Image (cartoon, helix red, strand yellow):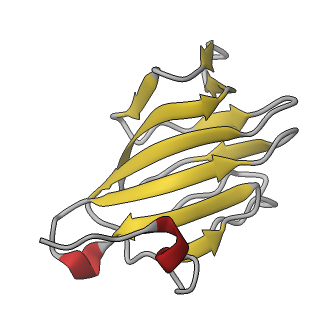
Amino acid sequence: MFIRRLDEVEKTPFFVDWGNGTSHRLLTVGDNMGFTICHTIVRPHTESLLEYTNFLEACYCIGGSAEIEDMDNNIHTIKPGDMYALDKHDKHYLRTKEEECVLVSVFNPALKGTEKHDINNPNGSGY
């Protein structure tokens, strides 16, 4: 067993500013668990076009709110207590308005932990 704290992760390369927010990579491939857990903060007034072709992702909202829009223009409001799963490597927009959104993100397979987005890529960003 091991314990890992947010403030400890902030002193490592596993604290990543991914462009429109930050991600504490609490569990990574080096931990040999087969998946990654992140504490993700999405900054207010941002829009990110994302697509994870190599990973499946599920996010559980624990603070704030966001909108998720799929490529069929379906928009879902996410608030604390809501979970969304990108079970088909779904390309999507992640948007926030006046407040930040705090998510617990799980990736399968595990991330190396230092991956970053290219938010300026017009085709979307992912890893």
Residue 124 lies left or right of residue 10; in this view the side is right
Residue 6: where, in percent of width, then height? 49, 66
Residue 106: where, in percent of width, then height? 36, 49
In the rendered view, would you say 94 is above or below 25?
above
In the rendered view, would you say 86 is above or below 70?
below
Q: Nearer the viewer, residue 127 or 100?
A: 100
Residue 24 lies left or right of residue 75; in this view the side is left
Q: Residue at x 81, y 60 (%)?
A: 120
Q: Residue at x 44, y 38 (%)?
A: 59
Q: Would you say residue 54 is visible in this rendering? A: no
Residue 96 quadrant: top right
Give the quadrant of the N terminus: bottom left
Give the total of numbered labels: 0
Q: Would you say residue 7 is visible in this rendering? A: yes
Residue 74: where, in percent of width, then height? 62, 13
Q: Which residue of the protein is positioned furthest toward the left in this rendering?
A: 1
Q: Residue at x 78, y 47 (%)?
A: 43
Residue 29 lies left or right of residue 13; in this view the side is left
Q: Which residue of the protein is positioned furthest toward the bottom in this rendering?
A: 12
Q: Nearer the viewer, residue 109 or 7?
A: 7
Q: Residue at x 56, y 58 (%)?
A: 126
Residue 53: where, in percent of width, then height? 43, 54
